[in-house]
């Protein structure tokens, strides 16, 4: 049955009136937006290992798997925030330390992953400590977050007087989560024989000799990109690594 011109106009008017009453659909928010297909949470597993030497002490941090599975870290993307860090068992000399922690970052909360790299040095033990998450000893917290604002300066704990915060090796790196399909998380681990000291970087800092190539890309990275070290601290390929975390 064909509708008359007058009937069609009346129906169109009713439809417009209903639309005006209902109003536009509400904009998606961080709470209502569906989780990204790859998983809503970026879970950073900060695995810190320690060993006692005579007369010193050594700490080292991993976030991603390396060629030495004894020091692996379970960093991943998931639909649920991580409840606890998943780490390797160590090698008998190095064991998991109290600064081990994990934190889940909601990727729907903003455009940028602001990766805060906080590096400390203890004069007495001649050892470095690197942290990236906030759920650890407040003296060594790092302010990694997801936000619509780009962080450009690191926000870190003060080291508690025993460890000194090292601005030259610390950094805040804003990574645009919309810029590619993968977060390529690079881990560069260095060692100085005389101090028996390891330390790790995950991003660029003021000292390019220890930069790590963490980035967002449409291509998954398969080899870590690291600075060459400074002659005293040399890169340890066995403990360095990269993990391509899917974002879409």
Image (cartoon, rainbow, N blue to C red):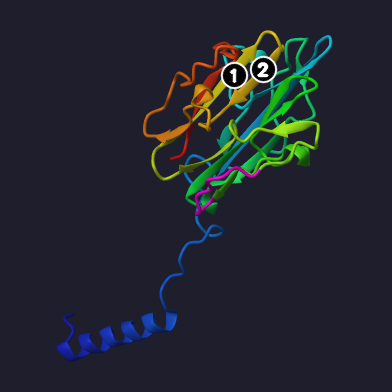
Mark 1 and mark 2 in contact (Cβ < 8 Å)?
yes
Q: Is residue 245 above or below residue 248?
A: above
Q: Quadrant of residue 94?
A: top right
Whichever of callouts 2 and 1 sits on the residue coming sooner in the sequence is 1
> Which residue is at a point 77% across and 42% down the rendered structure image?
138
Q: Is residue 42 above or below residue 196?
A: below
Q: Which residue is mark 1?
A: 189
**In the rendered structure, does residue 223 fall within the stretch colored magenta?**
no
Q: Which residue is mark 2?
A: 198
* Neighbour tally class for label 2: few under 14, some 14-19, many 20 plus, Cα within 10 Å: many
Task: Write the start and end of the magenta stretch as one range.
Answer: 147-155
Q: CA distance from mark 2 to mark 1?
A: 7 Å
Residue 172 horizontal/vertical position (percent): 55, 41
Q: Is residue 160 above or below residue 91?
A: below
Indicate left or right for 183 with 85 as reference: left
> Which residue is at a point 61% across and 37% down the rendered structure image?
43
Indicate left or right for 56 with 214 as reference: right
Question: The N terminus appears in which quarter of the rendering?
Answer: bottom left
């Amino acid at each position: 049955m064909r509708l008359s011109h007058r009937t069609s106009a009346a129906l169109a008017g009713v439809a417009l009136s209903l639309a005006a009453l209902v109003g536009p659909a509400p904009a998606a928010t961080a709470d209502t937006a569906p989780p990204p297909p790859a998983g809503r949470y970026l879970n950073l597993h900060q695995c810190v290992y320690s060993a006692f030497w005579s007369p010193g002490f050594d700490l080292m941090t991993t976030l991603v798997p390396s060629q030495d599975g004894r020091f692996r870290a379970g960093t991943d993307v998931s639909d649920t925030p991580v409840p606890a860090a998943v780490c390797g068992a160590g090698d008998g000399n190095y064991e998991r330390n109290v600064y081990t922690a994990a934190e889940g970052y909601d990727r729907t909360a903003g455009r940028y992953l602001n990766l805060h790299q906080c590096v400390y040095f203890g004069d007495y033990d001649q050892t470095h400590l690197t942290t990236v998450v906030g759920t650890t000893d407040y003296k060594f917290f790092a302010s990694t977050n997801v936000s619509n604002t780009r962080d450009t300066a690191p926000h870190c704990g003060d080291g508690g007087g025993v460890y000194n915060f090292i601005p030259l090796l610390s950094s805040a790196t804003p990574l645009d989560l919309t810029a590619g399909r993968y977060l390529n998380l690079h881990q560069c681990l260095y060692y100085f024989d005389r101090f028996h000291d390891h330390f790790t970087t995950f991003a660029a800092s003021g000292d390019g000799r220890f930069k790590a190539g963490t980035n967002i890309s449409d291509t998954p990275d398969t080899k870590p990109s690291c600075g060459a070290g400074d002659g005293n601290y040399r890169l340890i390929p066995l403990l360095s690594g990269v993990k391509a975390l899917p974002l879409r």
